[in-house]
Amino acid sequence: MAHPSAAQMWQWTLGLPEQLAYRAKGLDKLELSDAPPRRILVAGMGGSGVSGRFLAALANSTTVQIVPWNWAGAPSWLTPADAVLATSYSGNTAETLATVNDALAAGIPVTGITTGGKLEQLLRERERPVLSVPGGLPPRAAFGFLLGTGLRVCARLSGVELWQPERTVAALTQLRSNLGSSQFTPISVITKSLIERPITVYGTCPLTAAAALRLKQQLNENAKQFAWSATLPELAHNEITAAGPGRPPSRLCLTLAQEPPPLDSVLDDGEQTIYLRGSGPSPLAAVLGLVFQGDLVSLALAEARGVEPYPIERITAYKARLG
Ligand code: F6R
């Protein structure tokens, strides 16, 4: 059977603003407990799990603690005073299901975001809430549905608003129509500097670190390109010692700062970093602008490398092995 085309992947990816605007049914019915959870553990893997990084980064400037969790099984410190938000687009990811099973066995309230699968079945059997997002996309191309729903669920559970949906959607819609203008580094220019070299994507704060991880994943899955993510200042305490002559990876740095962070001077190896600076009416809108551009770069890189962005046979085979 033919898989979805690259053009379809572009179309889904360009739908980020509309995805973020999506309101899952049942949100208003999510029960609010008298005491908000002490912590929210956001469990998920890959394209689903990365939304937890954004939620945790945003929560850093509130009184809510959100912990992203990309492991199989729940941590022993989780208690019934906490909550789990399980995000799995397919609903069949073994690691996420293992965390949910542990949490349910320990009496911890679990809420799910999914298109169905075993996750939906398990939570319905236990009379736990499930927020459904539209199906038929690869999970990584449904990022806006997953993050937007995660933001709304966390606000509902904690009573603390983490974003302004309308403003964010409006800013991204505007960005989409301006992407070709001179205010942005053209996607083709960024892509050209990344061809056939491993790539490190740097973040310089918790929000851009989440975006750096997202771009690393997109470069891996869409462009089938080796990529890693790292953060400044942490890299100044380790990676810096490995920098030097040779053939270092291409460097992309995502930032919200007005001035470019001093990455080139810290690494001091003569290589040049491409800086992408996000701007917008809020830090989240700015960072999602970076995610949007990064997603398009990953598709453009796939095209430049002559690979199909949709298939991820190795992930499918890994999941089949896990059962
Ligand atoms: C595929 C993708 C993967 C999946 C991951 C977990 O497009 O992005 O990283 O997200 O394998 O699967 P789900 O999201 O179904 O829990």
Image (cartoon, grey):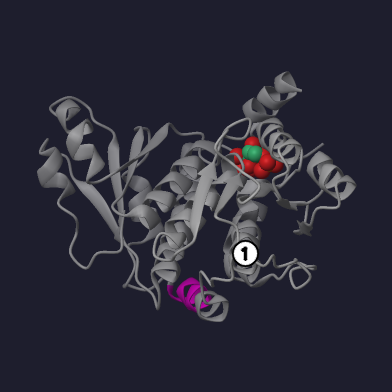
What residue does disc 1 label? Answer: 35
In the rendered image, the quadrant that contains the N terminus is: top right
- Residue 157, compared with residue 189, is above or below; it is below
Look at the magenta stretch and give its main secondary structure.
helix
Please tell me whether mark 1 sits on a helix, a strand or a loop.
Answer: loop
Position of residue 42 measured from the top left corner of the image (x, y, whole percent): 59, 48
Left or right of residue 12: residue 112: right
Q: Residue at x 23, y 38 (%)?
A: 235
In this view of the protein, which residue sits in the foreground, 14 or 38? 38
Residue 154 to residue 230: above or below = below
Kindly indicate the quadrant of the structure image that contains residue 186.
Answer: bottom left
Q: Position of residue 288 (x, y in %)?
A: 46, 63
Residue 4: x, y in percent?
A: 72, 46
Would residue 122 appear left or right of 293 to someone viewing this image?
right
- Tell me the crowding category of disc 1: few under 14, some 14 to 19, or many 20 or more residues within 10 angstroms, Cα based: few
Q: Is residue 276 left or right of residue 165?
A: left
